[in-house]
Image: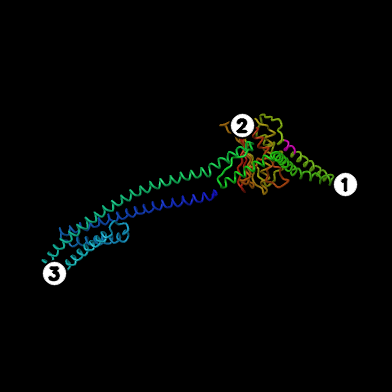
Amino acid sequence: MKLTLRQKVFFHFIIFTVITCTVWLLIYFSFNALNRKIQLINQKNDLFNIILEARRYEKNFFLRHEKSDLEKALSYVDQAASMQQQIENRFTGYIHDPELLRERTREIRSYRDLTAGFLKKMDEADSIGARDLKEARLDFQKKIVSLGRRITSETERIQDIEKARLYNLLEESKKYLLISLFVFILLAVITAFFLAVNVGRPLKVIENGIKKISRGDYSKIPQINTGDEFESLAQSLNNMIYELNKRSDQLLQAEKMSSLGTLTSGVAHELNNPLNNISTSVQIVLEEMDEPDDTEYKKELLKETEHQVDRARDIVRALLEFSRQSEFSSGEQNFRKLVDNTMHLIKGDIPSDIELNIHVPDDINVKIDSSRIQQVLINLILNSIHAMEDGGTLDVTAFENERDETFTFKVKDTGKGIDKENIKKIFDPFFTTKEVGKGSGLGLSIIHGIIERHGGTIEVQSELQKGTEFTVCLPK
């Protein structure tokens, strides 16, 4: 039974996960045991130091016979008993010999009981007599010294045993780490082999087939016998190649008709409004031809008709300019003067609620095709105006870049901005986000061509509801 690629990946993932989790659990428990061992040794260290303190005061007592030394020794023994009990409660499972631990606990308690008992006799010194007290002290000294020595030596021996076990655990942990490294390398090799055989090789065959198709070679790609999705994909590609071979002429013709349809549609929508306005104005003039008192009104209609004719002519001119380049002619031009002339041309199209700011130095002289760059300015400024339906600010700036002998001009607005998904398309012919009939989508495409013809670049930055900035950089 052949498995699909999804099933192969799933089973491989399950096996990889189980092995990885097993190895990491072993490492986790090993390091957890190490951590507990270290804590145990630290506790044993503290216990050993406390016992040594108790014995130090014990020796002081036998030298000076002062009750305060024995009381101090008893307080340390109490601490040692408490700590020994904690060790017994917390680390029973991590101790080499639990019975040895319990024996040390009993000895520490005996040590405490002997010390506390002799202190009680010292409190009763008056009733038992000096001679009996001295004999009791000698007996206490004999027992306590022997017991203390045994506790100290045994505690130290247990420490050494636990340290040896800790070193053994460290060695085992190293082995686990080496084993885990080997396992992961083995899993990586198996995974790489799995991907190479089940994914890499079929993908390479399909990639080579697609490259051949992109070069116009519609020969079939080799059959893939993996029994999974790649085999099905290869078969689908071969079916597609068969259809491409069969209908290549029809597809080429359809592509031509699609381009022509897009061009005709864009121009038709753009010309529709001015033609309707011209038709309406002419009808009104014809109907009121015999009315001698409406001369001014008729003049206004004829002026509007002329304006719409100019608009239609500009549309056709823009289309012709886009479809075939006229002779390119560059000459020395003062850029400030060009901007001023451009603003005079479109002054009537700037609404009163838009604030216009021009920051262009008077001394920028550049070698450009002035009519084409003026077209760039007009289109960029009008686009900015259309983007600010509720008013805003329009900035036109320019400056020289002395370092690389270029100059830059920018047109920035505070309009509605452009979606990120549309920014890459705005220079494509006939792409527009305006409503039908309000834009052909040729403006920015023509601008892009003009800037490239000058050997320059044009960039756009935009943010929704904050505005758009076009930056044009041209050689001086």
Colour setup of the view: rainbow
Residue nearer the viewer, 279 or 94: 94
- Tell me residue 102's x, y (percent): 26, 61
Label 3, label 1: how far apart the Cα atoms are: 150 Å
- Tell me residue 422's x, y (percent): 63, 45
Give the residues drawn in magenta, as a range: 316-320
Left or right of residue 170, residue 61 in this image? left
Please tell me how crowded label 2 is: few (under 14), some (14-19), or many (20+) other residues with Cα within 10 Å: some
Between disc 2 and disc 3, whose residue precedes?
A: 3
> In this orientation, does residue 442 appear?
no
**Badge nearest the viewer, 3 or 1:** 3
- Tell me residue 25's x, y (percent): 40, 53
**Badge nearest the viewer, 2 or 3:** 3
- Tell me residue 117's x, y (percent): 19, 66
Label 2, label 1: how far apart the Cα atoms are: 59 Å
Residue nearer the viewer, 291 or 72: 72
Any magenta on residue 43?
no
Between disc 3 and disc 1, whose residue precedes?
A: 3
Q: Specify the principal SS of the magenta part.
A: helix
Q: Which residue is found at the position 55% from the left and 40% from the top? A: 204
The amino acid on which the numbered mark 2 sits, given as a three-letter code, is Pro
Q: Which residue does the numbered mark 3 point to in the structure image?
A: 128
Q: On the image, which quarter does residue 136 sit in?
A: bottom left
Between disc 2 and disc 1, whose residue precedes?
A: 1
The amino acid on which the numbered mark 3 sits, given as a three-letter code, is Ile
Residue 475 circle label: 2
Label 2, label 3: how far apart the Cα atoms are: 117 Å
The amino acid on which the numbered mark 1 sits, given as a three-letter code, is Glu
In the rendered image, the quadrant that contains the C terminus is top right
SS at circle 2: strand
